[in-house]
Image (cartoon, coloured by chain):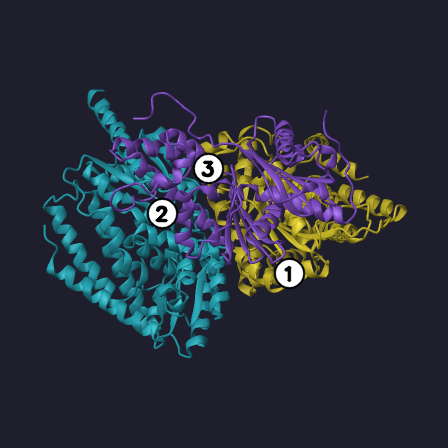
Chain colours: A purple, B yellow, C cyan
Amino acid sequence: MFPEKKSEFWKWTESSWKNPEADGRKARFISVGVDVGSVSSQAVIMADGKIQAYANIRTGSNSPESAVRVLRQALETAEMPEERIDYCVGTGYGRVNVPFADRTITEIACHARGANFLYGPKTRTVLDVGGQDVKVIRCDANGKVVDFLLNDKCAAGTGRGMEVFADLLGIPITEVGYRSFEFRGAEPPAVSCTCVVYAKSEATGLLRKGWSREEVLAAYCKAMAGRIYSMLERVGIEAEFVVTGGMAKNRGVIDRLMKLVGLEKVTTDWDVQIAGAVGAALFGYDACQKGKERKSGFPP
Amino acid sequence: MISQARELFCQRARMAAEWKEKGGKVIGYFNSLTPEELIWASGLMPMQILHSSGKITKSGQYLPEFLCAHLKGCLEQALNGELGYVDGVVIAHACEALRGFFGVWNRNVGIRSYFLQAPATSGKEAENYYHEELKLLWDFLGELSGQESSPERLREAIEIYNENRSLMKQFSELRKLPGSPVSGRDVISVVKAGLVIPKDVHNDLLRKLLAWFRESPPVPDGTDKLKFTLFSNTLEESDVVVQVIEELGGRVVSDNFGYGLRYCWEPIKVGSDPLRSLAGHYLKKIPCPGKYPLAQIAEELTEMAKSSGSDGIIWITEKFCDPYLFEYPFLVDRIKAEGFRMLSLEAEEAGNLPRLKMKIEAFLESLQENIV
Amino acid sequence: MEEREEVRELRNAFYEKYFQDLAEAQSGNKITTYVTGYLPSEILLAMDIFPFYPEAHASVGCAFNPAEEVDKLCRSAEIAGISRDLCAFSTCALGSMHAYPETNGGMPRPTFLISSAYTCGIHVLWWELMQHYYQVPHFIIDGPVLCADYEPRHIEFFISQIKELISFLEEQTKSRLDPDRFRRAIELSESASWYFSEILELRKTIPSPISFRQLTVEMFPIVTFPGAEETTNFYRALYEEVREKAERKISVAPREEFRLIWDNIPIFHDLDLIDYFESQGMVFVYETFFKEYWSKRLDPAHPFESLAKKYLSGWTNRRLERKIEIIEEAVESHAVDGIVVFQNKGCRAYSTGQLDVAMSLQERKGIPHLIFEGNMADPGGHDRNQVREMVDMFKDVLKSRKAGRKNG
């Protein structure tokens, strides 16, 4: 029923990007934001508040090492020596483990600020579905947090849950989105529970009953969307509503969620997985403008 | 100085043992609706049973999973034989789970226990009824201590407890001063000690603390800390939360705490019949949801946050605590109307420190004009 | 056996009366109050006050709506800050008010509110929220919060509370409680209770002539309108019918193999579960929820005292040891093979102490139990298949016990 030979279907590709138009050499301040999440880590390099380059990698078992690795990769992409950094802000689950950060700021504040940058100042509600948690953040026109809600301790409905599920069904994570719409007839009902452990056994049962993998996927995505939506309801959704984090790339969940939300989907050309690191880099830029200086050096 | 309070708290079992060596008896109780004065007046030592954060294993056989950690933890301790020094227990009705709980406790724990009913209203009939109930409780306590009930001794007990209320209130106020050496966490430590040591010893401690404070007055350092009011019904977890807030540069300046300010809100006014005065006080003055109008609780708590100049409110509740969960929507309405921001936490979140820190830090950040 | 004509007619007559009163209440032409479970509605009916029952509203809503709709109500409650960990009747009812504010969730606007503290203290808190919502007077019938047998002082306190209630009602309605109508209501309520308790008694016969599910539905009149003519008439007819079924040995199941006790409030959003038990030959013959609330008797010669005794002896007021005794007696009198312990997350008051009852029954009577967790009125997280698998396993336990008894 499941693929015999295990390949790593959950794996998404690491990436880096350099802004062809920005020229960091002329910039007054170079600020850096590093977001070390439970599943992925991002580093964003900003030149006077504009994105110069970024990198996105998978967080390894050692957070400080991942922080160093992602920043190195971003610096290489930007072709910038590390001495050039004026200020560095660490954020994310592993923010206290960013060894070279000058200060840390929570991912709540950074995601709000980052979403404001990536999606524009009309953003009022940010949904961030990360590897291990779901955050709903309400913010003002400056990207300042007004209210927020975190999911309860269970990992159901998070990126990690989706990875486990993709792996179980043998569907590459990047294909989950569109393949969850590839079923015939009416959309299958949501699975009753998004809890990873139970969903696994439920999925097994459904496959045994003759459901296609796409149908099971659809049922799981639908359940996840429902679960995320009930969180949004509790905080209240004010337009514009935007999504950040890895799950933003998963149409299977997000399209279904948007249907429940009933609002126009706001889009951006940016990779929204970097929102937290963008926010951190922006706070870093604030610090530079206020004359704050670098405290930490790079680890050897 | 404060470490003394923490030490006293940690040494509670030993102190109880010492008390017993001198021939005394210890009465365990569950919540702030227990008229402790009556226990004291009977020559017994009242000691609050606090749930420890230890694992719940044995009590799971007797109690539903969906009961608060306090009740599960208390039964667990008893089943583990950790309450050997307790000679009797008074369980005052504070919530519906307690009724069923009393049956389970009484059936499975070999300690003489008494269920104290408390009316939900405070009219004349309710007060008369409660007065009679207290008489019966007094008899129960007298049986345990072998002492006849004496109104004089009750008067003395109320005096000691009133003094404690007044000292606690004075001490709690100290954390509000800029640069005060007394933190919100210090207040919690002192409150905790007060629940488990004899009240006269606690009064001595408080007097010493107040004298020490006069010697070492606050040194304002010019920085303006974010100030918080804490609404909570759980002690151990509040201790953790307040510590995190204060490590992150905030300060808890006020609380409603079941055992904190709630406990010392007002002194008991003693009339010709001290028992009747006691009944009136516990019926009318303990702002516990279910026993006190919710609208009034919300009003008083909001007022508390306002008068203490708080920047935000932290609300912590034990999961599955019905009275507090019902209080919540009321409070939220009232607080939002006053423009306060509030962070709601579940007690069990204190068990996941990184996540707790993140939430509190994000809340603090959102209250700051500029994060950087 | 077909349902008797008379039963159908009298049931219809009751609902006609009920819905007529409800319509009048909804259009504002009738003095209306919200009442909590288990308070002396006899007095209200005698004063022509419509006692609307949010708990019944919630449970009926759960029983007759799809799970998605009920889930929506619970979510609406959550949005309003009302936790789903609370009494599930309250989340459903308050949730419906928030989901459909224009109709108060289908509930008539009350003239005033009445709650009671002795059956469940949660009611007082829940009613305070509704008081906040409607801004109308709220009377609390205080009472001894018992987990013990009642004593004279408890009766006295309760009577003082009923008298205060009457003064409150007279003040609110600007009319007096008519002694004749009061007596009549007590008589009617007593006789409805008599029929109801006799119906329950008939379940001692093998096979049992009426199902748990039917009782869950048919309890509505006695729960909402004790003391109304229509209620009593209906139960008289129902009693006759059930008696005939008992005499003719008509079973509710294809084959009654095992006789069970259900301990706790019914699981309203999955009443099909009862059918499933029956389809497997397992029939409920005794439920603490019916027996220990709605079959309590009244004495028209001593109306106040007997009201006190009725309303102070509900299951949640009982001493744990007494609960164990009562269930042990039921095991004998009803030839019971097993007990289903529904650990109801929606009601802590009912659920705390249940495990002791089950353990004691196992130890002293060798009666096996099925313990399962769920929620009486919140379908969230309820896995129907999983529960049915547990039922199957329980049947195996019952079977092997029976086989063991035959052989040993």
Question: Label 3 vs label 2: CA separation?
Answer: 22 Å
Q: Mark 1 lies on which chain?
A: B
Q: Earlier in the sequence, mark 3 or mark 1?
A: 3
Instruction: Name above or below for residue C54 compared with residue C282.
Output: below
Q: Can residue B233 be seen in this view?
A: no
**Type of amino acid at the residue the image marks with label 3:** Leu
At 24% from the left and 33% from the top, the residue drawn is: A210
Residue, disc 3? B63
Whole-Å distance between the Cαs marked 3 and 1? 35 Å
The numbered disc on residue B302 is 1
The image position of residue C192, as x and y in percent, is 25, 60
Front-lying residue, B344 or C362: B344
Q: Quadrant of residue B332?
A: bottom right
Q: Position of residue A163 (x, y in %)?
A: 44, 33
| Labels 3, 1: one chain | yes
Give the amino acid at mark 1. Answer: Thr
> Which residue, given by chain and number where applicable, does mark 2 sit on?
C379
Identity, as a three-letter code, of the amino acid under mark 2:
Pro
Disc 3 residue crowd, few under 14, some 14–19, many 20+, Cα 10 Å = many
Classify residue B120 as left or right of residue B87.
Answer: left
Name the residue: 55% across, 52% down. A119
